[in-house]
Image (cartoon, helix red, strand yellow):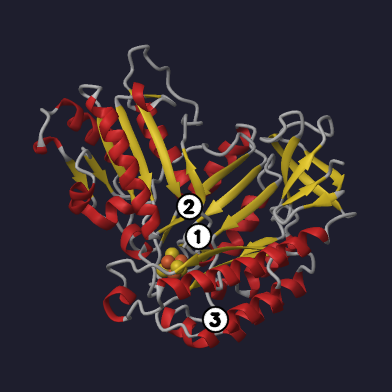
Amino acid sequence: MSEQLIPLGKRAEASRPAPVIAPDAPRVYMETYGCQMNVADSDLIGSVLATAGYAMTERADQADVMLINTCAVREKAEDRVIARASELGALKKKRPGAVLAIVGCMAEHLKEGLAERAPAVDVIAGPDSYRRIAEMLAAARTAQAGPTKRQIDVRLDKEETYDGLSGAAGGDGVSGFVTIQRGCDKFCTFCVVPFTRGRERGAPPREVLRQVRELAEAGYREVTLLGQTVNSYRWPDGNDGEVTFAELLRAVAKIEGIERIRFTSPYPVDFTADVIAAIAEEPKVCKYVHLPVQSGSDVVLERMRRGYTVQDYRDIVAALRAAMPQISLSTDILSGFSGETDDDHQQTLALMRELRFDSAFMFSYSERDLTFAAKKLPDDVTPAIKARRLTDIVDLQTKISGEVFAAHVGRNERVLVTGPSKRDPAQLVGRSDGFKSVILPAGVGSVGEIVEVTIKRSSMATLFATE
Ligand code: SF4
């Protein structure tokens, strides 16, 4: 699962070069919840709609189509979408002919039932239905008001990788995304993703390389390859062999203009020796890995069906650190899963102290229907205990992150400048190779450049090359 959550955001524009838009073109307002995969999917939808003659707007109250691209990984994310759908539904009433579309994982998860929780919805489209999104919106917009106008397509398609459709898009003009794999075959017992995004399938290498080249030609300097378990990527090579993730990484590294390559989210056991070697040997591949551990207890890992033990995980970390002593590691921790005891929790804290991740995404377990855990494993850790354990985990990680970031003070970092700092637009912000935000003094470089700076101070989430 791509567990790196982003805050509620909105994609104002499809950043792919759009066809000429007529002044009276229908307007689309889009909001994106969830992981980077959803951000990339919103760009794909934006590009499909631009081709169909739509223009983007940042104002929901001026939109003909309000579209929410959703996440189903946690209950809270779904609750936020329902609240937002109700607000947009109220706006829609004031704009005759406007329609509300809810797309993505939550649409797939709840299917027709979504309309009971969000009665204003007109279009419900799952993650494999985006080729049809313009058609569905057109049907909803031209139909008479009433239940018959609701358009629903939540079929999952084992083959769909949006070959030929996804274009150079996304990000900030410096750092873009390319989806190389969709779906997931791991079926961790707590996770709804295999049910909302379907089975794992890779995009053809020629399509991946085409998209990365397009990014490079559009001036992007960094590409993040996306997949639910991105390092399990494979593609039949036509000679009874396979193009592996390691080979794909090396091929992407040959593309001129792209200076940095990242990928997310990998799965621990798919860090085979060839993948580790490709990361270590290719200078363009950033020495940063997000490695979701979820728990430090073998009993819990087994119940989650993660497919590794704590020792297996330690061995993967050791192999990564042996090949790249400077590597930065982040992780995901899911606290309070079914049957988790205080002793299991203490083992998670102990593993965090031992491995000292640079940062972590930390969550309390919430049951998701359709999953094995929802059907067979009791959600038996009380909310109060879940809250206390999550606080322990967050407090410990905050302390460790503070120490890890402080250790960078005095070191030189190569930083890709991505834009002006939000806090102080007179300063610049960028990312280090190890995926840390760095604040830079204005004038050290321009957007899209990689500059070498000395870190002068730190917080638990940011490095500063400024006084
Ligand atoms: S099933 Fe497991 S590997 Fe797949 S997306 Fe969910 S947590 Fe990640």
Q: Is residue 275 left or right of residue 327?
A: left
Q: Amino acid at mark 2?
A: Cys
- Under tag 1, what secondary structure? loop
- Under tag 3, what secondary structure? helix
Q: Amino acid at mark 3?
A: His
* Ligand 1 within 8 angstroms of badge 1 C-beta: yes
Mark 3 is surrounded, within 10 Å at the Cα level, by few (under 14), some (14 to 19) or many (20 or more) other residues, namely many
Residue 6 vertical placement versus 306 (above, below): above
Q: Earlier in the sequence, mark 2 or mark 1?
A: 1
At x 59% / y 56%, what residue is drawn? Answer: 263
Dot 1 corresponds to which residue? 3
Pinpoint residue 14: horizontal percent, then vertical percent.
46, 31
Q: Earlier in the sequence, mark 1 or mark 3?
A: 1
Quadrant location of the C terminus in the rendered image: top right
Labels 3, 2: front one? 3
Q: CA distance from mark 2 to mark 1?
A: 6 Å
At x 25% / y 22%, what residue is drawn? Answer: 95
Q: Which quarter holds ligand 1? A: bottom left
Asked whether the residues under the numbered discs 2 and 1 touch, taking CB atoms below 8 Å apart as contact, a structural biologist would say yes
Q: Amino acid at mark 1?
A: Glu
Dot 3 corresponds to which residue? 345
Dot 2 corresponds to which residue? 35
Res. 183 mark: none
Q: CA distance from mark 1 to mark 3?
A: 20 Å
